[in-house]
Amino acid sequence: VVSTLKIYGNACKIHGTDSGVCTNKYLPSTYSLDKNDEKDLDAIQKAKNIWNAEIPFCGRWIASYYSPCVPARPTSEWMSADSNFPFGRLSNDDNVDIYSVKNKDSWVEKSVTSTIQARIEMEKQKGKKHYRFYKNKDCQEAYARYFCWLNFPRCDDFEESLPMCQSTCENMFRVCGFESDLWRCEENIIDGEYDQEETGYRDDLQGF
């Protein structure tokens, strides 16, 4: 029996708001006659064609491994929770639009690229003692994976998004050579509910 493509109806959480939907459309098993056959080349290629079209950046680390929580509607309609709006709120600001899964993937890629570039420039100015990302492809990829997993969280069998494993977050800092007292893997971050203005997360990463 061919596996059924599912785009679940219940909302899953992205950045603390019920703004997502779980989907298995990027999994090869969805298109395989035998869902346990991990070497079904036709199913693998079909799934790859889909995630290459929709999540070409993050798909490399998501598509074949789990059912992600993806935007269910244009994010012009919502903004993430913060201290003033603990349950999130609607927004009319066109500047925060991520109209589709593909556009969110593109936003993630741009965010990753800009953060890495800023970090490398800072390291080059401060000198070899501060090198983390500079000339370290493993670190750069670990950060990209981390940011993708944070923005496209894994769904469980109950159609709810799961927090990132703390060990996954810690591995990124470990691969990049950060001392353990500089790791930022608090619960609000791995749950994807951090507020950048409150935590200063990206600024902290750039400033280590």
Image: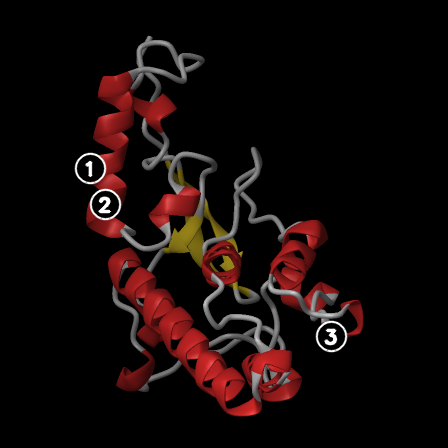
Q: Measure how far apart labels 2 and 3 are at the Cα level.
A: 35 Å
Residue 40, relative to residue 208: is it above or below?
A: above
Residue identifier under label 2: 52
Q: Which structural element holds mark 1?
A: helix
Q: Is residue 44 left or right of residue 11?
A: left
Residue identifier under label 3: 182
Q: In this view, does 195 lie to the left or right of 14?
A: right
Q: Which structural element holds mark 2?
A: helix
Q: Do the residues labelled 2 and 3 touch (CB within 8 Å)?
A: no
Q: Return the mark for residue 49.
A: 1
Q: Return the mark for residue 6.
A: none
Dot 3 or dot 1, earlier in sequence: 1
- Residue 144, picture quadrant: bottom left
Q: Measure how far apart labels 3 and 1 are at the Cα level.
A: 39 Å
Task: Report the residue that reaches farthest toward the right.
Answer: 181
**Of residues 31 and 114, the one drawn nearer to the viewer in this rendering:** 114
**Of residues 1 and 136, the one drawn nearer to the viewer in this rendering:** 136
Q: Do the residues labelled 3 and 1 touch (CB within 8 Å)?
A: no
Amino acid under label 2?
Asn
Amino acid under label 3?
Leu
